[in-house]
Image: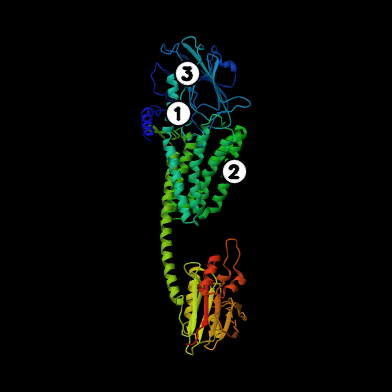
Amino acid sequence: MKRFLILLLLLAVVAPGMARAQTSAFPAPQNDVIVLDHWRTHSGDNLAWANPNLDDSQWQTGNAPTKDGGLVVKVGFEWYRTTVTLPEALQGREIAIGMGTLGEVYDLYVEGVLIGRFGHWTPKPESPFDRDVTYPVPHGIVKGAIVHIAIRQWMGNSSTSYFPFYSSGAARFPRTPELGLLSTVTANTKLYTFSGVVRNLPWNLCLLSMLGAGCVAFVLFSAQRARAEYLVLGIYCIGSFLAPLAGGILAANDSVMRRSWGPVMIFLAFGAFNITPLLFLSRLCLRFRRELEIGTALSFASYLAIAFAFATQASFTNNAFWTTVSSILPTLFYLLAALGLLMQREVGSIAIGIALLLQQLATAWVNSIHTLFGMSDLRFMPLGPLAVDLRAIAQALFVFITWIVLYLRYRQEQLRQVALEQDMASARRMQEQLLGGSAPRVPGFDLAAVYLPAQEVGGDFYRTVPLHDGSLLVIVGDVSGKGLDAAMLVAAVLGSLANEVERSPGSLLEYLNHAVTGRTGGGFITACCARFFPDGKIVVANAGHISPYLNGRELELENGLPLGISVDAEYVEAEFLTSGAVTFMSDGVVEARDSRGELLGFERMAALTSKTAAEIAEAAQRWGQEDDITVLTVGRMAAV
C-alpha cells in the first residue's frame, strides 16, 4: 500500500506537465527528446510516400498524428511526414520513436524503412486497442543529422473510444510523437501510461462509487423485495462498474483485436447497462411507464445494431447512423422520464428528475452541443494531475441524488413497516384475548385447543361457552383470506356471539349468517357449531366447514352454505351420542403442503384425530403450514 501511495505521489509530481494540453509534450530535457509536432499530411495510400526523397511540399500542413478518443473518426488511409534535425547529443546513439494512441493500424517509417507496425494488414486490417508504444530505430538507418519520418495510418469503422476499453486511462489521452534516446523514450512511454491512469482517477472513482451504490441497492432490495426499482438500480450500478473493468482487462491484451467478438460483446453489455436507468425510471415514473419500457427496448436495439456494425465492419455510413441513434434515442426517453418525474410533484421524484436532466445535458454537450458553439467538450478538464469529465460529474450526481432519495424512501417504508408490525402484534394479542386462551376450562368437559395463525393474525376462530343447563356450546370457524382483514371479521363474528349463545346450533348459525351477510367484502365464513350435553348427546349444525371427527370417523352432517353468501341459507341440525372426544379442525390442517407440493389430505388427517389437539396441530405444521391451523377437542370428564 505504501509503494502504491509513493507511486501516485511521484506521478502527481510529473503528470501536471502532461495535463497542460492534449497535444503537449512530456517534460523532458531538450537534448534527449525531440517533440514531433510539425507534420505534413495527405489522404489516400501510396507506399512510395514513405520515400525520404519524396517532395511533400504540396501536402497540407497538419497537426501531429494523435487521436483524441472521440466518437467521430475519419475513415480510410492518412499519411504523415516530418523531417527533423538531430542534435549532436543524439547523433550516433541508440534512438527511438515514442507513439501514443493513433489509429487502428499504422506503419512507422524512418528513412523509408519500416521500423514498426501497430496491428496487422492481412488477412484484414485490424489491431489491438490503442496504447503507448516505443519503436527503437535500428542502427545504421539514420546516417546523418537529418531524419525523415513517415506514418501510414488506417482508420476503419470502429472507434477506440468504447468506454469499457479506455476506463483504465491508457487510451484516453493523446500523446504527441517524440524522437529521442531509447532509454528516455522508453521511460517516457511508461510514464505516459501511468499518468493516463492517474489522470483517469476521477472516472475510476466514479465507477467505484457505482459499485458501492449498486451494493446498497441490492441490500435495499433484499429488505424490500416488492421494490423492483432497487434491483434494477443495483444491476445498472454494478454493471456500469463490471463492464469497464472487464473491458480494460481485455484491452490490455495485445492478442485481442478490437473488432473481435469479445470486445463487441462487452461493448454491447455496457450499452445494455447504460440504458438500464430507463427501466429503473419506468418504475418511478408511473405516468410514462409503458413509454419508457418501450424506449428501453428500442435503445437496446440501437446498441445491438451498432455492435453488429462494428463486428462485421459494416459501411461507415451505417455505423455513423447507428452511433447517432444510440446516442440520441435514449436521450429523448430520458427527457421524457425527467418530465414525468417533474410532473409527479413529489420532492424525491423532482430531485431525481433534475439530476437526470443535468446528466443528459452533460452527455448532449459532450456528444454534440459543444461543436455547435465551437467550445470545449469538457471531457478533459484539468484538475491538478487529474482530468475530470463533465459526464462523470453528472453521472455521480445523478446516482448520489437517486440513492439519497431511495434511501429516505426506504427509511420511511421501514418506519411504516415497524408501525404495521406493532399494530399486528397488538391485533394478535387482542385476538388471543377474544379467543379466550389456548386451553379453556369448562366444568364437566375435557377441552384442548391449539390456534396457529399463518401470519401475525389469522382468520380462524373458536369459542366454547358453558350454558346454564350444564351443556357446552362450541363453535369453530374459518374466514376466507388471511391477515388483518380476516382478523377484523373474526372480531365481528365473536362480537355477534356475545349475547346469542343460548340459541340452538342451527339457529345460531342462521343468526350469524344474517349478521355477516354484506360485511365479508366478497368473502365468506365457514363454521361448525355443536352443543354438548352432560349425558353424551351432541347437536351439530354445519355451514360449509370440515365436519368434526369422532374416534377417527367423520360425523355425517348436512353441509349448509358458508356464512355471508345468502341471507336465506338454512342450517340443519343433527344429533349424536358420543362416548369419546370430538375433534374440530380448520382446513389449515388438511391443506398443509410439504416441500414437494403434496397435501396432508383427509386420509392422513383422519388418522391424526385420535391424537391430542397439540399433536395434531404440530403434525400439520411440521408437514408444511400454509394456512391458519385450529384444532379443538371436546371430551366428557368422568364423574368423580
* Label ID, residue 193: 1
Residue located at (44% from left, 21% from top):
185
Q: Residues within 10 Å of mark 3 (few under 14, many from 20)?
A: many
157, above or below 212, in the image: above
- First in sequence: mark 1 vs mark 3: 3
Image coordinates of residue 481 in percent, x first then y, are: 54, 69
Residue 612 showing in the rendered view: yes
171, above or below 435, in the image: above
Q: Amino acid at mark 3?
A: Ala
Image coordinates of residue 635 in percent, x first then y, are: 52, 82
Q: Mark 2 — residue?
A: 301
90, above or below 424, in the image: above
Image coordinates of residue 594 in percent, x first then y, are: 57, 63
Mark 2 and mark 3: Cα distance apart in space: 46 Å
Q: Amino acid at mark 1?
A: Thr
- First in sequence: mark 2 vs mark 3: 3
Q: Secondary structure at mark 3?
A: strand
- In screen coordinates, is 315 left or right of 335? right
Q: Amino acid at mark 2?
A: Ala
